[in-house]
Amino acid sequence: MRWLWAAAGLIAVGLAFIGIFLPLVPTVPFLLLAAFCFARSSERLHNWLLSHPTFGPPILDWTTRGAIARRGKVLASVSIAAVFAVSLALGLRPAILVVQAVVLGAVLIFIWTRPEA
C-alpha cells in the first residue's frame, strides 16, 4: 500500500511541476496532495518535499498558518479572470455564466480571506 501512496505523491509532484509553467493548472493543491501522500508512504520523500527550496515554503505556509502568498493570490485571481473571459468569449449561455461567476467568486473570496504568507 505504501508504494501506491508514493506513486500518487510522485504523480501529484509532476502535476505541480507542470502547474509552474501552465497558468491554469494549480500548483500548491497538488503539492499539498503530494505531502499528504508522502506522509503515508515515505518519510524520506516527505522530508525532501518539505525542505525543497521551491516546493516546501508554500506547503509549510499552508499547513502551519493556512496562509497563501500574495503572489499566489494574484496569480490565482488572474487565472480565474482569464477562465471567465474565455467563457464570455465563447458565448456560453447566461445560466452557465452565472453559475461560473458564483463559483469563481466564492473561490476568490476564499483565497483573499486567507492570511498572507
Image: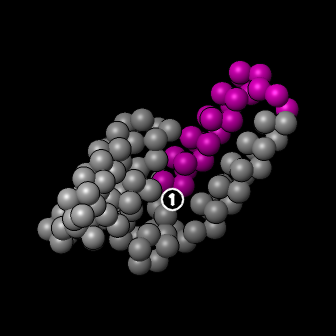
Which quadrant of the structure image shows residue 48?
bottom left
Task: Tell me the residue at 28%/61% (across/down).
Answer: 5
- Of residues 41 and 70, the one nearer the viewer is 41
Would residue 82 be counted in the magenta stretch? yes
Would residue 22 be counted in the magenta stretch? no
Tell me if residue 116 comes above or below residue 19 in the rendering: below
> Looking at the picture, which amino acid does disc 1 mark?
Arg
| Residue at the disc numbered 1 | 70
Residue 77 x %, y %: 60, 47
Tell me if residue 88 comes above or below residue 60 in the rendering: above
Residue 28 x %, y %: 42, 56
Q: Give the structural element (helix, strand or loop) at label 1.
A: helix
Task: Tell me the residue at 39%/53% (across/down).
Answer: 30
Tell me if residue 91 comes above or below residue 4 in the rendering: above
Which quadrant of the structure image shows residue 29?
bottom left
Residue range (magenta): 72-94
Task: Tell me the residue at 39%/62% (across/down).
Answer: 32
Residue 24 x %, y %: 50, 38
Is residue 41 shown left or right of residue 111? left
- Of residues 76 and 32, the one nearer the viewer is 32
